[in-house]
Image: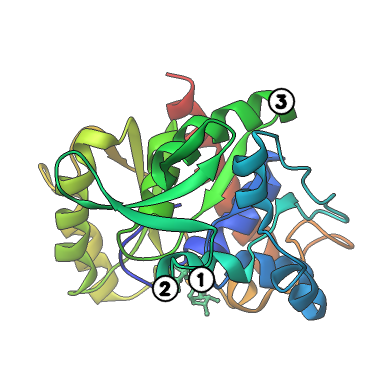
Amino acid sequence: MVQWKGGVGKSTLAVHLAAALDAVLVDLEPWGGATAWWAGGRSRNLWQAAGPAPVLRALQLGRTPRPRAGEAGRPRLVPSHEQLLALTEDATNGIAAWAWSADGRPTLMVNTSHGPKPLADALRDAIPRWATEWGAHVLVDTPAGFGPLADGGVAAADVVVLPVTLDQWAVPALRKFMASYAPRVRRGLVVPNRVRARVVDDRWAEVISADGVVQEPFVLGPPIQESEVLHAARRPLSAGPAPSAARATALQQIQRVATRALELAER
Ligand SMILES: Nc1ncnc2c1ncn2[C@@H]1O[C@H](COP(=O)(O)OP(=O)(O)OP(=O)(O)O)[C@@H](O)[C@H]1O
Ligand SMILES: [Mg+2]
């Protein structure tokens, strides 16, 4: 899940897509929206657990992290951790350090079992290995904006899922994002999110489905409607007794996106 624009639904869709795909959810968002949803009142125990952050420890030791077991429809999880926040804000804490890359750009380096490596490269190399070891699909949630965590997720991914809300700010940002990431994305799935049954949304839907807006390697995916269930769900959509009509609709839309993402991944 990637989008440089915040609040478009990356974390919300991440948890439900991971559940639909029976995937391991790797939460690279420093504030850990997906981890907070997953753990509810206990999320502090994960976020502030004794360090290092599970992802960083795995990179450091060259090991595959052991995901937390998901219960009652929750996906397995490699949780976020407060050290991910320290990573980008203050790199003088021994976890990571900024260095100049050969092309003169500042690069965040982390310690790995093979010595210091750019964080994005370390994630690119490690996540597919973890997927093989887990024998499962992996869904990575990333923070908004550009940075090594999002870059690493993009580099590791067979499919980058790009939620987009339909408004005048989102569409130019989406185009810019697609243009700058196109060379690095294998397949991209643009998912209109929070779509409402309103005329303005129909207009924006027309704009993004017009020829030439979403171009290879990106494709336009099925939409997810604005849904009180998705907004407020504290539990997995599949948990508990037979779903209400609203929950069934949300589940079905999530399932459609999950299926589309898999199709693209397998191409
Ligand atoms: N389909 C939807 N229907 C209703 N509310 C939604 C939907 N998708 C997301 N939201 C709401 O939008 C808000 C932002 O969602 P979320 O945190 O998932 O975005 P994000 O892209 O992960 O944000 P950030 O960039 O800060 O990580 C949340 O309040 C969430 O409940
Ligand atoms: Mg988020």
- Residue found 24% across the figure and 73% down from its top: 167
Give whichever of 5, 253 is nearer the camera.
Answer: 5
Q: Secondary structure at mark 3?
A: helix
Measure the alpha-carbon separation of dots 3 and 1. Answer: 28 Å
Q: Looking at the image, is mark 3 or mark 2 earlier in the sequence?
A: 2
* Mark 2 lies within 8 Å of ligand 1 (Cβ measured): no
Quadrant of residue 153 within the rendered picture: top left
Please give the residue where the numbered disc 1 appears in the rendered image.
Answer: 86
| Numbered disc in front, either 3 or 2 | 2
Viewer can see residue 252: no
- Residue found 83% across the figure and 60% down from its top: 239
User: Percent from the top left, x then y, of residue 264?
Assistant: 43, 28
Check disc 1 and give the amino acid type.
Answer: Ala
Q: Secondary structure at mark 2?
A: helix
User: Do callouts 3 and 1 mark residues in contact (Cβ within 8 Å)?
Assistant: no
User: Percent from the top left, x then y, of residue 60?
Assistant: 61, 43
Residue 222 as seen in the image, left or right of residue 132: left
Measure the alpha-carbon separation of dots 3 and 2. Answer: 32 Å
Q: Is residue 265 above or below residue 11?
A: above
Quadrant in the picture for the C terminus? top left
Tell me, what colour scheme is on the image? rainbow
Q: Which numbered disc covers residue 267?
A: none
Please give the residue where the numbered disc 2 appears in the rendered image.
Answer: 89
Q: Secondary structure at mark 1?
A: helix
Please give the residue where the numbered disc 3 appears in the rendered image.
Answer: 133
Q: Is residue 30 above or below residue 115?
A: below
User: Do callouts 3 and 2 mark residues in contact (Cβ within 8 Å)?
Assistant: no
| Numbered disc in front, either 3 or 1 | 1
